[in-house]
Image: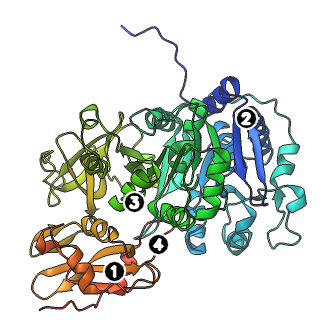
């Protein structure tokens, strides 16, 4: 016997409809590329999204056609989130930090039909426009007064002209909830990037899960500023969660330096933000240098790469900001685990709580995970004892079952998605990433996790950034090499830094050598590019004495 409940599809358009109807006066604040601050309500944003949906249809955008963006976090980008997906097209956010050759490949592989871009990226679009034959229309995301006086892009359209060309009398179509809604490509550190195609259903379920109290804990009393880009896995779902709960949204546009972010946090009384560790380093450096405090900021979500324990404590002890570690990946929409505390942890002392919070967290409902031997992914599950480390596998309704156009074939292992991360899980279900499979160091047949070494190095007061990679060793095959950027003015030596490891780690895990560099390469999503470091130090000779 079936239940007798209504069957309403889970659609992205329902989020903006809900926000318009029940939180219509809530505002979306954006720092624009044009230099000013723009404000519009959810009711206004919804109306503009409907007009844009009609304008896209007038350009010939049909069901499942890809609408690409090269844009910062802003209200126009948000309007495209809903206009494209809500109308039945597929939103394809492209990372503008990629090389033009990669953008050409991604746009061609996706077969994008329309490309909308912020004026910041006009030179980039001009560089690739002649190399993307599937794109029929280019749209500058600005008004008529700021349109470029000259450009090599033929028949360049103006975003605000498109909005003005239509009225808002538009009804969102009722789609199959399994229909594709948006497309994101992986970072592509090895080989070409792969496309991950999300559905309306997967996005809505991810939105429900991400907004839960034990996840990002989003509510209508929040003011959310996503520093994580809208081109990076849909800003971790925050533009959807904000509409679901009716939170105020603040978009920083291109101003991602510490000073610009701090001023926006204070002016708009931001309570929740999210981004990668490299962004927060800049923010903390600014507030430290000027003796500033946060008047409204309550918590920040840090993901993309592990949050250094020193950063977690600095936010908490000096600024009263709770750090919530999160872990996931493009193939997971992206949320998998979140580092919130359980009831049993609330009675612990501060340092004990921090040690729990150093984990990447526990799964939110909708995600399951397990670890297996790195030598046999089909083998038995390893115990959750906080000691055993293995390859991390996941499954759930917002996790990819395959890549767009079946690139790479079937990636699943017995119905589980192999993340490429090496992790351990404790008895309470808290997972901690110890390495990427390709980054792990195998010394004399034993595994060494590079992230643990990096976290210790980052705790040194004179270290600005640290990366640990494997270097060849004549006896042990591989040994840890620590690559370090000193803080300005520091004269930190190799001996001083290696001495800092004493008592903090197993002696045989201690790096064999330290190399000081001016900078460590950072990828398009804010992660350290260890593949480039491994290439740079491929022939490095470790000391043998």
Residue underneath mark 1: 483
**Residue positioned 88% across, 44% down in the render:** 164
Front: mark 1 or 4: 1
Q: Earlier in the sequence, mark 1 or mark 3?
A: 3
- The image quadrant that residue 254 belongs to is bottom right
Front: mark 2 or 1: 1
Q: Earlier in the sequence, mark 2 or mark 4?
A: 2
Compared to residue 509, the image places residue 513 above or below, namely: below
Whole-number angstrom distance, CA of label 1 to CA of label 3: 19 Å
Q: Earlier in the sequence, mark 2 or mark 1?
A: 2
User: Horizontal placement of 89 versus 320: left or right?
Assistant: right
- The image quadrant that residue 429 belongs to is top left
Q: Answer yes or no: do the residues labelled 2 and 4 have beta carbons within 8 Å?
A: no
- Residue 522's tag is 4
The residue nearer to you, when weighing 327 against 261, is 261
Q: Residues within 10 Å of mark 3 (few under 14, many from 20)?
A: some
Residue underneath mark 2: 46
Q: Secondary structure at mark 1?
A: strand
**Residue positioned 45% across, 38% down in the render:** 210
- The image quadrant that residue 51 belongs to is top right
Compared to residue 253, the image places residue 524 above or below, namely: below
Q: Residues within 10 Å of mark 4 (few under 14, many from 20)?
A: few
Q: Position of residue 61 (x, y in %)?
A: 72, 46
Whole-number angstrom distance, CA of label 3 to CA of label 4: 18 Å
Q: Earlier in the sequence, mark 1 or mark 4?
A: 1
- Residue 311's tag is 3
Residue 372 in sight here: yes
């Amino acid at each position: 016997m079936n239940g007798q409940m209504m069957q309403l599809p889970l659609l992205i358009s329902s989020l903006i409809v809900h926000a318009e109807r029940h939180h219509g006066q809530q505002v979306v604040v954006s720092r624009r590329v044009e230099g000013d601050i723009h404000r519009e309500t959810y009711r206004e944003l919804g109306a503009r999204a409907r007009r844009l949906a009609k304008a896209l249809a007038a350009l010939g955008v049909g069901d499942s056609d890809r609408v690409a963006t090269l844009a910062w976090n802003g209200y126009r980008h948000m309007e495209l989130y809903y206009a494209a997906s809500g109308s039945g097209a597929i939103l394809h956010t492209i990372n503008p930090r990629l090389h033009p050759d990669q953008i050409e490949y991604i746009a061609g592989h996706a077969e994008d039909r329309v490309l909308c871009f912020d004026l910041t990226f006009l030179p980039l679009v001009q560089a690739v426009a002649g190399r993307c034959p599937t794109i029929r229309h280019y749209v500058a995301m600005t008004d008529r007064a700021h349109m470029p006086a000259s450009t090599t892009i033929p028949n360049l359209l103006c975003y605000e002209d498109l909005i003005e060309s239509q009225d808002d009398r538009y009804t969102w179509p009722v789609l199959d909830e399994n229909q594709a809604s948006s497309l994101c490509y992986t970072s592509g550190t090895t080989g070409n990037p792969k496309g991950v195609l999300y559905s309306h259903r997967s996005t809505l379920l991810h939105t429900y899960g991400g907004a839960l109290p034990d996840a990002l804990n989003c509510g209508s009393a929040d003011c959310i500023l996503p520093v994580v880009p809208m081109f990076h896995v849909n800003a971790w779902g925050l533009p959807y969660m904000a509409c679901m709960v009716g939170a105020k949204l603040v978009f920083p546009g291109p101003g991602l330096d510490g000073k610009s972010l701090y001023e926006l946090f204070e002016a708009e009384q931001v309570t929740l933000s999210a981004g990668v560790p490299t962004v927060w380093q800049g923010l903390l450096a600014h507030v430290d240098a000027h003796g500033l405090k946060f008047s409204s900021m309550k918590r920040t979500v840090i993901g993309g790469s592990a949050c250094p324990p020193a950063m977690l404590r600095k936010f908490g002890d000096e600024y009263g900001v709770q750090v919530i570690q999160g872990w996931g990946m493009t193939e997971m929409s992206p949320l998998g685990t979140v580092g919130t505390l359980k009831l049993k942890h609330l009675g612990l002392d501060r340092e004990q709580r921090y040690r729990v919070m150093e984990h990447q967290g526990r799964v939110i409902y909708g995600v399951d995970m397990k670890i297996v031997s790195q030598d046999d992914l089909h083998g038995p599950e390893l115990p959750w004892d906080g000691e055993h480390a293995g390859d991390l596998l996941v499954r759930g309704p917002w996790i990819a079952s395959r890549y767009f156009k079946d690139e790479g074939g079937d990636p699943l292992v017995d119905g589980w998605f192999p993340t490429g991360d090496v992790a351990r899980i404790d008895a309470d279900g808290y997972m901690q990433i110890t390495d990427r499979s390709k980054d792990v160091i195998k010394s004399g047949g034993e595994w060494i996790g590079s992230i643990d070494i990096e976290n210790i190095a980052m705790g040194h007061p004179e270290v600005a950034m640290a990366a640990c990679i494997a270097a060849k060793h004549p006896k042990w095959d591989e040994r840890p090499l620590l690559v370090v950027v000193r803080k300005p003015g520091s004269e930190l030596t190799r001996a001083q830094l290696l001495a800092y490891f004493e008592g903090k780690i197993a002696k045989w895990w201690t790096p064999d050598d330290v190399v000081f560099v001016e900078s460590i390469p950072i990828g398009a999503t804010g992660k350290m590019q260890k593949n480039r470091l491994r290439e740079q130090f491929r022939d490095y000779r470790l000391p043998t004495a």
